[in-house]
Structures are given as C-alpha cells and as structure tokens.
Image (cartoon, rainbow, N blue to C red):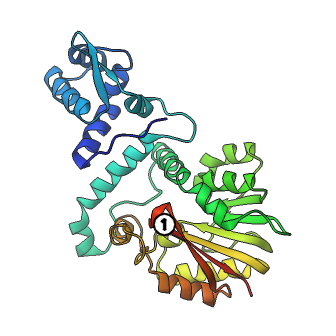
Amino acid sequence: MPPLPAMDWRSVLVAHAALATGLLAALEEPATPAEAAGAAGLDPRATRVVCTALTSSGVLEPAGDGRLRLTDAGAALVRPEGDRDPAGELFLEVRAIRSHLRLDETLLTGRPPDEVSGGDRATRERFMRAMRQVAGERADETAAAIGPPRGGGRLLDVGGAPGTYARRMAAEGWSVTVLDLPETLEIGEPDLRAAGIATVAGDATRALPAGPWDVVYLGNVVHLFDPATAAALLARAGAALAPGGLLAVQEVVGDLSPQGPSFGVMMLLSTAGGDAYDEGRLRGWMADAGCPVERAVAIAGGWHHLLLGRRR
C-alpha cells in the first residue's frame, strides 16, 4: 500500500475533512467535483475548492473530462488493507493538531486536553490502527535487536494490544503474552489469539502476570506515566524476569531522538504525567530495577531507541 504524500498541517486537515464527510468515498469512481458534491450531500463550491487542494496534495488526480479519481494513496485512506491504515494515522494527526491548539489551557492548568488512548470505541479503534501502522516501520529492527530465544522463550509484551511487535516476536520463536488494559485488549484480542498469542487483561502499573519471564518488552509505554509510576513499572518488570532475563525498553528518548522535545509536548497534551524521558533517567531506572543497560540500539534512524539490560 502506498504511503500518503508528505502533508503540512493544512493538507492533513483538508484530507481529514474530505474523508470524514464522505467526499473521498464519493470519488472512488471517477466523478466531477459537482457530481461528488451531489453524491455526498456537500456544498458544490466548497467541494470544488477542496478537490483542487486534494489534487495538489496527491490525494486526487485528473481522470479526464473534468473528472477526478483517487490516487493509490487516496484510495488507501478509504479502503485500508491489513495492518496499514493511513486513515488511522490521519485521524491521529488531527487529534494532535486539535490538542496543540489548546496548549495555552494546559500551560494554565497543567491538565491535558486529550487522553492518548481514550475516546469512544471508534476513536480507540482508529488509534490502534494508527499504532499498528507506525509500529510496522520499526518492528523488524526491534525483533532483530532482541533476537530469537536462547534457552527460555517466554516474552511479555506490556501494552502490546495493537499486536505488531507481538506478532513479529512470535515469528522469531518467542512464546508471547500481551498484557494490556481490558478496554484496549478487547479490540486487539481477536487478532492476537488468531496469531497464537496469549493475552492477559490488566493494569501494568498495578501488577504484571506471574513470571518468570525471559524477556519483558515495554514498547513505547514508559512515556505515558509520571516519573514515580514509570520507575515503579520498570522495577516491577525487572522483578518479573528470570535471572539473566532481558528487560527491553523502547522509547522516544528525549535527549537522543530528533522528535524528543516535540514528543514531550505531545505527552503533556495527552497524558496526566508522561514525558519524553532522557537517556540518563531511563538508564537509572533500569539499573535500579536490577537490569543495567548493556546496549542501546537506535531504531528508525534514531527516532526511537531500544535500551536492553539483563537481570543480574
């Protein structure tokens, strides 16, 4: 499936509006802007202007006789295939834009205007599809860095309901169990179970499934929590490992990733206490958990990092 063309915030909002109102669906078959407006019940002038913008951004293309059609990238927004869902990522971008427009409120109150995985079921499903898509670009690197089982093969994926990493680890030969919140797991569980992956509904900030585990993988989870909760989670993960077991923490590391500072703002806007934690703090928490970092692996060109430490 082709990726979406690079879009600035204006183009993101235009594409989102076209998707949400049914304009893109009305152009699955070539049509003029006027015909698409009629089919979707939209204003003809507004539709014409938006269609011009969508053509400029690579979502639509001319089809002759004044008609327009979806490009391959535009068609992927309307009918996603498999785990790749550009529409989910588009909705996520729009949520981020809306949250940033309320940053002044957060500066005054300290409260986030959005909840990173909250909303109704449809919103949570879109969020999970977006997570699957973005994770798909990193899962191979992560699995290669962790490697196949050596001896024991039990791997706990904390917060892994989207399933991209879990399925990739299972393909390496790990016996994978995913722990996630009940309302999140109910969406991802059918696909996970179909792939032979065990699931446990629960809250990692309270308890982890009984070990010992050979690997505990915390993929893009630590940034959701305040420092005390994050440190306690890592301590809990370290304690759940078998001797010599691997604690694998993948994060947008605040002082290593080019997106670290902006990601910190995103956590400010979407969590009660999360942050893009710097390398020193993550290393300190892992050392305190009895799993000092042995290796730090740059993932996705350094936009993410995987910190690996073995339990003493």
Residue 61 vertical placement versus 261 (above, below): above
Residue 161 seen: no
- Of 131 and 268, nearer the camera is 131
Q: Residue at x 32, y 62 (%)?
A: 113
Furthest residue in direction front, as rendered: 301
Residue 249 seen: yes
Crowding at label 1, few (<14), some or many (≥20) Cα neighbours within 10 Å?
Answer: many
- Of 240 and 281, nearer the camera is 281
Q: Residue at x 74, y 56 (%)?
A: 172
Q: Residue at x 22, y 27 (%)?
A: 51
Residue kind at label 1, given as amino acid type: His
Q: Find residue 50 and report its horizontal and vertical position in percent.
A: 20, 30
Q: Residue at x 54, y 49 (%)?
A: 132
Left or right of residue 62, residue 88 in this image: right
- Of 290 and 60, nearer the camera is 60
Callout 1 secondary element: strand
Q: Which residue is mark 1?
A: 304
